[in-house]
Amino acid sequence: MFDELKPEVLVVGAGPVGLFTALSLARRNVNVRIIDTGVWACTHSYALAVHPQALDLFAQLGLKEKILAESYPVRRIAFCDREGTRVALDAGDAQHPLAVVRQDALENLLEDELEKLGVRVGWRHEAAAVAQGDDHARVTVQKFEKESRGYIVAHTEWVVAKTWELEPKFVVGADGYNSRVRRTLDSEFPEVGPAQYFAVFEFKTDADLQNTVRVALDGGTMNVLWPLPGGAARWSFELPDYRPSAPDPVEALRKAGFGDFPTERQKDRVLLSHGLDLPVLDEAHLREYLRERAPWFTGSIEKLTWRIVVRFERRLAKRFGAGRLWLAGDAAHLTGPAGVHSMNLGFWEGADLAAKIESILRGGADAGALASYDARWQQVWKQLHGLERVPAPGPQTDGWVAQHAAQVLASLPAWGPAYEDMASRLGLTAA
């Protein structure tokens, strides 16, 4: 059992990356605590797939087989136009597929493993203030609880029930888009590409999806078909001309200075609207998107179970950390939906931080051992964002692939040498 009041490391954010990072630290016998403003873990998936490379990390934790048991194995990625597949390549094999797993299933697995080690997620806990120190960080933690209010009209409100101070040796900010840890670092978070809106639909279907994820490129739009466990499918259609008619209410309150509110955990994207209140989300539009962009999809739409408009941004933090404060996952980078890069590289970042922090706390390494973390991941992300060492078409590259190279590269479920290998199989090589 770890001491919750005197953690060596505080992980802020209990999404997949935060939970993985906390578990990696706990397995190294580092006294870790993890908190999140959410009321509980998310109850719906948004981070879709675990890369074959990331499965190796889960194998080191003894969790690979459990993830595969919960997942739909994707072994190929196909790039299509309206007529059908133009080019396809292997994305994994039987032992290392692209594992499509619900985010809630993944998070529950990680949380259960943490609890076995005596680490409980502090739901409804906020890092209200974070500060650097010479040999530790200082964090003000607030715990929220519901309180009954009102006399004539009874109601409940979230109130701060308890406040206390922690002084961990390190803080890992896996707290997503609005990361307080990143803001404390004063690390700018600029856009490195235009934002994209997508209409996302999940439904039961009789389509034979053949263990393949399909990226349909039509009229300048990117549209992605993911097979899901249980005979379901997810289609994401880019909406190039979409403009939201109303701001997200929670985000508006946050920007107005009212702080964070405990909610069901969501993936750190701007989730604009659920259900039937937007015309772009009705079944007629779904059928229209399919007819216009992917007429080769002839599967049934038996039961529409989820629909939402999502804004995906492309951002990269100017630095991934300094001193006692470090970032991982969406707190440090955001990208589009097809390659599922932000979560998967977040796992590698979490593993990297855990190893470096252990070497400092247990192996006698200097705190400067973390300096290489920023440089390494900045380089990786600059390539994935198309800023440096971008694989490019050559004389022998298929013309259609060359025309759509940027969208194809953004969809490859890999990074580093594996990413460059996949790109080279399509005739795209890094300089």
Image: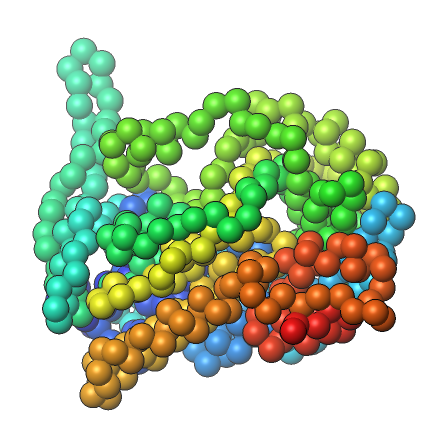
Percent coordinates x, y for residue 200 in the rendering:
63, 40
Task: Relative to 80, say whether 155 is above or below.
Answer: above
Task: Relative to 249, say whether 134 is above or below.
Answer: below
**Residue 267 showing in the rendered view:** no
260 or 300, which lies in front?
260
Q: Residue at x 76, y 35 (%)?
A: 289
424 or 113, which lies in front?
424
397 or 77, which lies in front?
397
* 214 to the left or right of 321: right
Q: In terms of image quadrants, where is residue 82? A: top right
* 157 to the left or right of 90: left
Q: Residue at x 71, y 66 (%)?
A: 392
Which colour assignment does the render follow? rainbow
| Farthest residue, direction top | 152
**Residue 378 showing in the rendered view:** yes
The number of numbered discs placed on residues in the rendered structure image is 0
Q: In terms of image quadrants, where is residue 386? A: bottom right
Percent coordinates x, y for residue 63 in the rendering:
48, 74
| Farthest residue, direction bottom | 363
Q: Residue at x 86, y 41 (%)?
A: 295
